[in-house]
Image (cartoon, helix red, strand yellow):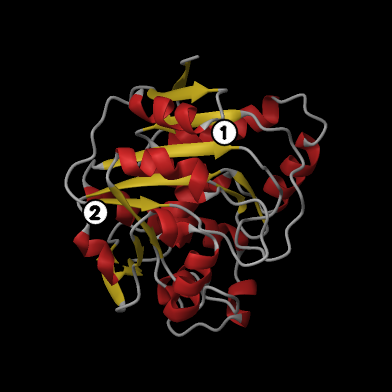
């Protein structure tokens, strides 16, 4: 597989976000889903709707989310919609909680650990997807980027628990914390692969390296950012864009990098890159192209 192109800008403005997306030279077709993290109630680090507004409108997108598999302000459609209003998403965009009407199953015959993925049923209404990720640490996955958005992010509430429980049907919340970590990461890669294959190339990925805490935007109580803001990356390859972000963190001279790397390595977070490469949904070989 030839090297993937990953475009990079240090311009962390709304205009920079549009500029790096347009560097891809790809127009997303039909009805476009914009998968992003809308932020748990109490979280301070998630990307704000005002920041992404121009890009979402540029692709004529609908902001999509799915309900969570844990207690909080996003675990039912009603509560989730209320928080979307509170956080400002409904003010600027059409919003779709994709599992509000249940699940759709994507088969994964070649899966490393799971052979199917439960996604929000409304995924069937979209022709393309822009995966707009806030790159940061994560208490379970080590880091959160494009691959996590494709997997846990697109999974329904049922699907999230299924992935976390490595394919155990009717797994409990407690079961999610008693699985082999490497198996969990492989299950995420499996789920991500099913979404990539579903869209048949009608995908684009943008990762924003700002407000980088070791905690996910799903944490109601999250640590403040431990690294200075870096920039925005865009690619047509979900593996390459995450690998580029990880490499930037590892090569950084920011004193906070050690805290971020400790979180990534404690959870073996980079293993998902190898799993995704094995599944054939991207490459870890890339060319980083500065567009500034």
Q: Give percent across and percent down for residue 146.
A: 46, 45
Q: Is residue 106 left or right of residue 42?
A: left
Q: Give percent across and percent down for residue 65.
A: 41, 63
Q: Earlier in the sequence, mark 2 or mark 1?
A: 2
Q: Give the position of the N terminus as an image quadrant.
A: top left
Q: Give percent across and percent down for residue 265.
A: 70, 46
Residue 229 bears which disc, if any?
A: none
Outermost front residue: 91
Q: Residue at x 68, y 58 (%)?
A: 139
Q: Tell me the element at label 2.
A: helix
Q: Residue at x 48, y 65 (%)?
A: 84
Label 2 neighbourhood size at 10 Å, few (<14), some (14-19), many (20+)? some
Q: Residue at x 54, y 30 (%)?
A: 13
Q: Is residue 261 left or right of residue 40?
A: right
In this view of the protein, can residue 233 be seen by the observer? Answer: yes
Q: How many marks?
A: 2
**What residue sits right under mark 1 in the picture?**
245
Q: Residue at x 67, y 42 (%)?
A: 212
Asked if 191 appears above or below 242 in the picture, the reply is below
Asked if 180 appears above or below 62 in the picture, the reply is below
Q: Tell me the element at label 1.
A: helix
**What residue sits right under mark 2 in the picture?**
198
Q: Is residue 278 left or right of residue 144?
A: left
């Amino acid at each position: 597989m030839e090297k993937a192109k990953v475009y990079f800008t240090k311009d962390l403005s709304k205009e920079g976000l549009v500029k790096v997306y347009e560097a891809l030279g790809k127009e997303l077709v039909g009805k476009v889903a914009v998968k992003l993290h809308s932020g748990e109630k109490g979280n301070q680090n998630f990307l704000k709707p005002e920041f992404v507004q121009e890009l979402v409108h540029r692709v004529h997108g609908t902001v999509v989310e799915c309900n969570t598999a844990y207690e909080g302000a996003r675990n039912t459609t009603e509560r989730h919609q209320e928080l979307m209003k509170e956080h400002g998403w409904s003010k600027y965009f059409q919003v779709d909680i994709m599992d509000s009407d249940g699940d759709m199953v994507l088969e994964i015959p070649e899966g490393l650990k799971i052979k199917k993925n439960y996604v929000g049923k409304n995924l069937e209404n979209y022709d393309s997807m822009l995966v707009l990720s806030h790159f940061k640490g994560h208490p379970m996955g080590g880091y959160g980027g494009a691959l996590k958005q494709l997997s846990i992010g697109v999974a329904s509430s049922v699907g999230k628990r299924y992935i976390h429980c490595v394919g155990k049907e009717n797994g409990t919340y407690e079961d999610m914390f008693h699985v082999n970590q490497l198996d969990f990461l492989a299950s995420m890669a499996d789920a991500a692969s099913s979404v990539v294959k579903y869209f048949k190339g009608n995908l684009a990925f943008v990762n924003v390296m700002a407000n980088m805490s070791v905690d996910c935007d799903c944490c109601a109580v999250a640590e403040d950012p431990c690294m200075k803001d870096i920039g925005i990356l865009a690619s047509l390859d979900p593996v390459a864009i995450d690998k580029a972000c990880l490499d930037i963190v590892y090569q950084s001279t920011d004193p906070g990098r050690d805290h971020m790397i400790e979180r990534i390595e404690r959870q073996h977070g980079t293993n998902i890159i190898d799993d995704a490469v094995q599944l054939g949904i991207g490459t870890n070989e890339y060319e980083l192209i500065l567009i500034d």
